[in-house]
Image (spheres, rainbow, N blue to C red):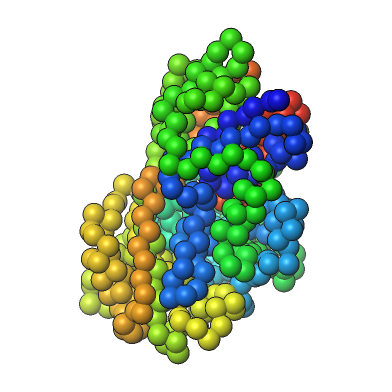
Amino acid sequence: MRTIAVIGGGISGLTAAYRLRTLLGEDARIVVFEATGSLGGKLRTVELAGERYDVGAEAFLVRRPEALALVREVGLGESLVHPTKTRAKIHAGGSVLGLPPGTVMGVPASADAVAGVLSEKGRALVEAESSLPPLKLHPGDVPLGELLRARFGDELVDRLVDPLLGGVYAGGADGLGLRATMPGLASAIDRGARSLTEGAASLMPASPSTAPVFGTLLGGLGTLIARLAELSRAEIRTEATVTAIERTADGWKVDDLDADSVLLAVPAPSARRLLDGVAGVASTVFAKIELASMAVVALALPPGTALPESSGVLIGAGERDVAGRPFAAKAFTFSSRKWAQYGEGPVLVRGSVGRFGEPGALHADDDELVRVVRDDLARLTGVTAEPIDTLVTRWGGGLPQYGIGHLIRVERIERAVGGVPGLAVAGAALHGVGIPACVATADAAARRIAGITPTHEGS
């Protein structure tokens, strides 16, 4: 019987365990080690005022195929739901405005696309960008913030790009790389676009699609975690921190388990520690991936509490209210507006706190975090209703930063791991932080362990 140790019980680890089962059949022994007391990692569904509610990732891209295909494959397709037609807004320049269409993660296809968000001076800089010297990117990655500020000035970055990136990475443009975070835009420039606006314009569809962009599952994304664990028929060991993995003459030693193969689906610091002495180059490179911490403050407000007509609000790091006071939160999601399944019950809202390099309010205890987030909500929306339930979920080091050189780092990690028989890696530190990207890396890692060469690693 072949034995595989999967270290990490998040979406990447459980997808890998499930895929290993489909590839290797019933004769394989699959053991999942999870350091915490529950499965799911950054997918965490809790009960809030009697409702099943996600306090980690709340949705996945359905226009990228991997997660959607997995949901359907495991029989959860009929549980798939999409957001309502309400649109997100942004607090920019002291006002709450509609999030402008016609941008690629905030990089505009034209000056008109961002006219309502920027000052006249900022709009003029966007308009003039196409007349600047033509862009030619370095084959390696380039600093995103430096490039955007040089071409557009600071206002576009601070008011629009950073809030959008903050929702994905909990980090801003100044710490990220263009190719790692906006590969489509970089490719457009490589193909001949002479400016960022021209590159963004080339990525705009001829006619806007009406197909949903995001999806989630009735009952929360925890239902996917439970289904993967069930169908993998793996031995699940929770509260099982693996401190070391060791190569043996016949395979691997993982705690008390003799295994033929090991698949790591853990955050970068754990990967660094476990690979030390096994794949030294990969361990060293994992150590260079920086992480951001954040917290989600979930609020259940009394039924009937009025929320703004939007799915949520993004808030830039430098934004202030009319009295000049800064905000602690970087975003609010008005879940009862965004997702129709919440119906007539408690009104659900989540506030996100924490940016890379700026822990700020994260140093506060849970009661204080609830207080500051409620204060932000009141100043943004006028909503002051007393919650009937609250929950603070902290994600310490939860989001890897795709900085300059990230793509080269990942290439080095995969090359180093690829040289070690019976070893594979997966997870958000590699080819993307979203659920589809994690599923893709898990599938590729499982196929490597099973001896099936993927057509491409992770992407």
Quadrant of image for the N terminus: top right
Q: Which one is in front, 4 or 440? A: 4
Determine the image quadrant of residue 232: top right
Please provide percent x and percent y for residue 315. Answer: 39, 66
Residue 259 in the image: state x and y as whole percent.
Answer: 59, 23
What residue is shown at x 42% (from left), y 35% (from top)? 241
Q: Between residue 198 and residue 405, name the one nearer to us.
A: 405
Residue 294 occupies which quadrant of the picture?
bottom left
Residue 227 visible within the image: yes
Instruction: Give me the residue at 47% from left, 75% from top.
Output: 50
Left or right: 277, with 412 as reference point: left
**Residue sitting at 55 percent across and 75 percent down?**
338
- Residue 6, above or below 97: above
Report the residue at 47% width, 50% height from top: 38
Q: Which residue reaches farthest bottom?
A: 304
Nearer to the camera, 320 or 190: 320
Q: Is residue 116 left or right of residue 367?
A: right
Quadrant in the picture for the C terminus: top right
